[in-house]
Amino acid sequence: MAFSTDFLTLEQKKFQKTVEHELQAMGGMLRPYVGTADDVVPSSDSCIVNRLKQKTAVRNTDVHADTPIGDDAWDRRWLSKNDYITPASLLAPEKVVQVVSDPSSEIMQAHLEALRRSQDMVIMSAFFGTARGEKEGDTSISFDTTNQVVAAGGAGLTVAKISQAVKIFRTNHIGKSTPIFMAVTPEDFRVLKNDVTFTSADFNEQRPLMDGNVLPYFNGVFFVEINFDDDEAYPESYASFTDSTTSPTERYLPLWTMDAVKFGDWRSIEGHMDLLPTKRHNVQIYGKGSWNATRVDEKKMVRLAVTA
């Protein structure tokens, strides 16, 4: 079976629309729980993410006095795009129509999941990585390892550690109405569920939900289960979650509020299809996307350590 140029163009458009639609409908697992960088310009490789710093109310002692005016203080972070591409799949011409017309096909899902994981990877890299700040983006801003951490203490994930992390948020004036999210591996979550305090209604004002489309919840924290321990699936962010210099090895679990991290999407989701005459006129398909993320507020992030 050989493709005409017109037919290949039609299938290419279908593939492009499918990849774009599927990723817009469902991005990475962490994507719904971080903020969006609104100032991304597709034609520019970088953008600025501004955050208004905390304001303090002053007592009004004179009802006839002028309204106090203060200069708004902004914290500026820079975000540069990363380009990602999925390794191409080589398909026989008769296989192309089947794959393109079925978004649930194994090949199509492999490319979509790879792009989704790349979105999660840039978000995870932003949690504890170095942010770029100030006017020109030439100032490195490290994660606060003095005030925003919970020590491993030779144990896995426990309710006591989660309570310590929540206390840090409350100390930083983050109230109960602000959702806190926590990324946990399946193993971390299994360990946590064995803690009777986690499942007992006597200790939890809202009993954790373990299934369905609702995130499990405990003590103001929503749990997002993601296997970020997989260095093959998340090669760029894996190292920032493990400290092999300790004995035993420690792993880091992130807790954050939605506005602690901003995700920038350069609106460049693409699905490509190329006819390869030198490969017996088979067709290669692959996906592309450009995005990145940055931490914008250190006081709204906590690093909780557990033993591996």
Image: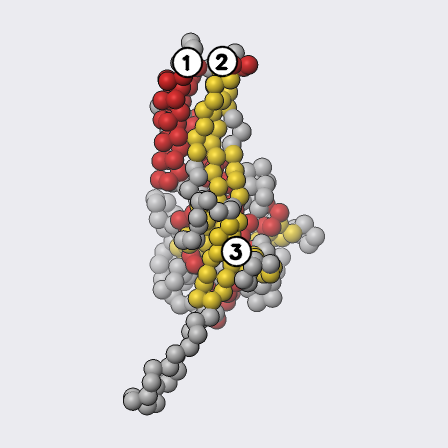
> Percent from the top left, x then y, of residue 261?
47, 55
Residue tagged by mark 1? 3
Do the residues under discs 1 and 2 have CB atoms within 8 angstroms? yes
- The answer to which of 18 and 149 lies nearer the viewer is 18
| Residue name at image x 46 percent, y 44 percent | 43
Residue tagged by mark 3? 78
Residue tagged by mark 2? 281
> Percent from the top left, x then y, of residue 69?
39, 79
**Label 1 Cα crowd, 10 Å radius (few <14 / some 14-19 / many 20+):** some
- The answer to which of 89 and 139 lies nearer the viewer is 139
- Where the N terminus falls, by quadrant? top left
Q: Tag 2, which secondary structure?
A: loop
Residue lying at the far front in this picture: please name it.
43
Q: CA distance from mark 1 to mark 3?
A: 45 Å
| Residue name at image x 34 percent, y 44 percent | 212
| Residue name at image x 55 percent, y 63 percent | 134
- The answer to which of 285 and 71 lies nearer the viewer is 71
Res 16 visible: yes
What amino acid is at disc 2? His
| Residue name at image x 36 percent, y 62 percent | 205
**Label 3 Cα crowd, 10 Å radius (few <14 / some 14-19 / many 20+):** many
What amino acid is at disc 3? Trp
Q: Earlier in the sequence, mark 1 or mark 3?
A: 1
